[in-house]
Amino acid sequence: MSLLKLEQATIKFGGLVAVNSVSFELEKGDLFGLIGPNGAGKTTCFNIITGVYAPTSGKINFDGRDITGTPSNKIAQQGICRTFQNIRLFHSLSSLENVVVGGFLRHKTVLGSALCYLPSAIKETDELKAKAMELLELVDLADVANTRSRDLPYGKQRRLEIARALATQPKLLLLDEPAAGMNPQEKMELLQMVKKIRDVLGVTVLLIEHDMKFVMNLCERILVLDHGEEIAQGPPAEIRSNPKVIAAYLGEAV
Amino acid sequence: MQFNFGKWFGTRAISVIVAVLFCLLLDKVMQGPDKSYYRFLMSLAGIYVTLAVSLNLINGITGQFSIGHAAFYQIGAYTGAVLAANKFSHLAATKPLLWLFLAALFGAIAAGLAGLIVGLPSLRLKGDYLAVVTLGIGEIVTIIAKNQKSLGEAYGLSTAKIESVFLISLLAIVCIAVCRNLLKSAHGLAFLAVREDEVASAAMGVNLTRVKVTAFVLGSAFAGAAGALYAHTKAFVSPPDFSMDVSFLILTMVVLGGTGSITGTTIAAVVLFLIPEKMRDLPYVQMGTPLGVAIGIIVAVVLLRKIQESFHGSASERLGRNLGSVGIGIVVAFVMAKVLVMVPAFQSMINGALFRMPVLAVTLVVLMLLRPQGIFGHHEFSWSWVQKLLGKKSPETEVAA
């Protein structure tokens, strides 16, 4: 059974059809890429999946449940978490605290015991911090655990966003242009990291990216959007030679 | 860091005992008919600390810009006053302390409920829009009190006079402790996350509505408890005690102390309450004197700004220059005051106490120019910080609180 299934998902903003009856399926353990020219509706697709917008029509199924129109926080609870195209960290919190907030949705203690500083709340906070520290080590940020996230360099902020999303213990991770603004060296490291996330943690990954080398090397299947519509879907080799994709996005080889 | 129950219990027990003893001591010191003025000041200072710290929970920690905090203060005060005058007059007369405790509890419940009713619909708004709604609520509550016969209309309500520095200071300490505990736990981080970025915190699974409404209800409840204690301290409540000025004074305390910092808010609350209070005693002065002081302040601020913008030396050099600028400001103030007084136009006498309110405005403007993040910024007082100041090494540097 598929993990995520979009059926004819459509969203209209007034007269503009941002995403037009897009359907695709993700299997557990997939590394799936979403590409297309600017304004093709890739991020809007993410926003529909994570509940920022409710689709105008169509259905979204996740792990056997209909999640169409469910609010963001509930979707995160069910196991979909994302990063943002324009980094949205909690800027005045430290790296560690950012990741702890990600882990917060799996906490059990009630607010009352936190307000009274009861042992259960302290223990759980300590546990969350320990888990957050492990994740920071995974993304190689343990040395800046106590640095304010605002003060981190750009590449580290991107990695911190991934760690924060992983802290929610997602089944499906959505990465919105994770390699944007990174140099080739950083991109290579990121590629390894995403592979590790899939292989070691068993998290299914759906990602948007403009760097074709990155996508073609990483993803096993790719969906191409243009003007909100699907124009191709398949493994990288097929996409690369698809005439429609070349016309709309990749361009002719010179 | 391993959790240790014995250590936890010991620290908690000691802090609670110390807090209660401190409040009892304060109460003892403030007893006696000759100290009634200072007792009143002390009580009001404690009430303002509670109000400011509870508003800080809403404005500073959760980032919901509310400027109608006096409304909940008023609801608490009227609840206490009305109940003491009607239903519980017997209890208030026979067991005043018990009643005062209950009054605070009732005030908190009433204000908390009001906070829930107001918060559920209005917390969907953000920023300026929420500010306008809360401002409106402040006005609505005052106008209702002004026009209800049972609430004494514009004249106000008198009630039993029960003074207890003990309960007031205990309430302030409990309020501070609750906020501090919140910030020490993962729950508090979720509150801070809502302040930092709503979209991202929702994507991380934080329930925005619940966090915002919880903060609003908790903050309102503390304000309500403070209101009930205020009503009995003064033995009288009237609408002007809870006007927009009060909301803004509380807001000023939060901003001045550093939005989000409990320590800063507490200190700012005491200072901002005492400045106008102490300035009541100022004598009549010649017009030239305050003008000279104003010129001195402007000179000092301009110099300090210049240093902030263009000086990049070591911390001690910077401190020296800053102190120098303040010194120059003081000298200029003195000289200008003396010179201006010689001008006949500036020789007329003026009541110094009139400057009580402008001083608040000037303080705020100076602060916004020199330190927009507030005196404490986002920092908090902590024991490791004290140890660092004393030159010792902190034992728990690896897990920063």
Image (spheres, rainbow, N blue to C red):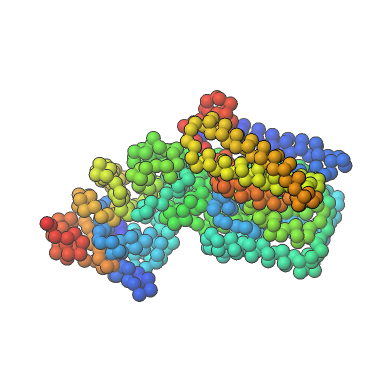
Relative to residue A22, is residue B191 depicted above or below?
Answer: above
Name which residue lies at 38% across and 74% down: A14
Q: Nearer the viewer, residue B88 or B162?
A: B162
Residue placed farthest to the bottom in the image?
A15
In the drawing, does residue B73 fall left or right of residue A233? right
Report whether residue A132 is seen.
Answer: yes
Nearest the eye: B58 or A91:
A91
Q: Quadrant of residue B237?
A: bottom right
Q: Is residue A168 above or below residue B70?
A: above
Q: Position of residue B79 (x, y in %)?
A: 74, 59
Place of residue B26 in the rendered image (x, y in percent of width and height, measured from the top left): 76, 38
Q: Residue furthest right?
A: B33
Residue at horizontal 72 percent and vertical 58 percent from the top: B242
Task: State which quadrant residue B327 falls in.
Answer: top right
* Image-based side of A208 in relation to B307, left or right: left
Residue B60: where, in percent of width, then height? 57, 50
**Residue B168 appears anywhere in the view:** no
